[in-house]
Amino acid sequence: MDCYFFGTFNPPHLGHISLAKRVKAEFGFEKIIFVPAFLPPHKKTLDFIYRYNMLKLSVDDTLGQVSDIESRLNVPSYSFQTVNALYEMVFGTENTRSYNKIPFIIGYDAFIDIERWKNPDILREKLEFIVLKRHSCTKEKDIKEEDIMALKDRGYTFRLAKNVEYYDVSSNNIRDLVAKNEDISRFVDKKVEEYIYEHKLYS
C-alpha cells in the first residue's frame, strides 16, 4: 500500500524527505506519493510547475513518486476533491476490499482541526491518517490525548507515528534565506538549490 503526503512544498526540503523516509520505514509502505497542491485555498504560493519540478528532483524511486493530480482537478485545491479522485484511482468505482482507506500523512496540530476542513466527512470515510507529532509546535502543548481519542470516537481512523522527528527547518525560513542570498545547502537537495537559483525563485 502507498501512503500520500499532501502539501505546498514551497520549496520541498530535506525535512520533508526525512519525514517521508521514516514514515515509509515505520509503517512498511511501498511508496510515499507526494501530492503538491495546485492552488491552495488559504495561502499564496509559487506556481505549481516549479514546486512540482523541485519535488521531482528531491524524490528518488526508492522512496516514492510525485503526483500532478491536483493540476487536473477543479480549483481551488481542496483536499476532499483530491482524495475523491485518488480514492477512485486506488480502489475503483466498485470497491470489494474489506479495508478501503487511503493512508494520509498529517501533522498532529492539523489533525486536531480536521473537522474544520472542507467536507471532513469525506476525509473521515476515505482516509487513514498517519499522525505525526511536531515537537516544536507550540500549539501541541495545549493538545490533550483525549482530544485526539475523541476523533476516533467520531469515526476517524488513524495511527500515531512513533519514530518520526522533524527537522528544525521550514519552507518559509528557506525562502527568507534565498531572498537574502544566504546559504541553503543544509536544508535542500543540491539539485533543488541549483533549480531555485537557476530560475530566480524567491528572490
Image: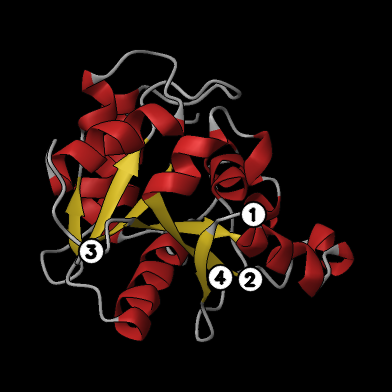
Marks 4, 1: nearer the viewer: 1
Marks 2 and 3, how far apart at CA: 29 Å
**Location of residue 188 by image quarter:** bottom left
Look at mark 1 in the image and give the residue it sits on: 154
Marks 2 and 4, how far apart at CA: 12 Å
Marks 4 and 1, how far apart at CA: 32 Å
- Looking at marks 2 and 1 on the same chain, the residue that comes earlier in the sequence is marked by 2
- Looking at marks 2 and 4 on the same chain, the residue that comes earlier in the sequence is marked by 2
Look at mark 4 in the image and give the residue it sits on: 167
Q: Are marks 2 and 1 in contact (CB under 8 Å)?
A: no
> In this rendering, would 163 be left or right of 108?
left
Location of the N terminus by quadrant is bottom left
Say if residue 201 shows up in the picture.
no
- Looking at marks 4 and 1 on the same chain, the residue that comes earlier in the sequence is marked by 1
* Residue type highlighted by circle 3: Ser
Residue 98 image label? 3
Residue at screen point 28% across, 43% down: 54
Look at mark 2 in the image and give the residue it sits on: 133
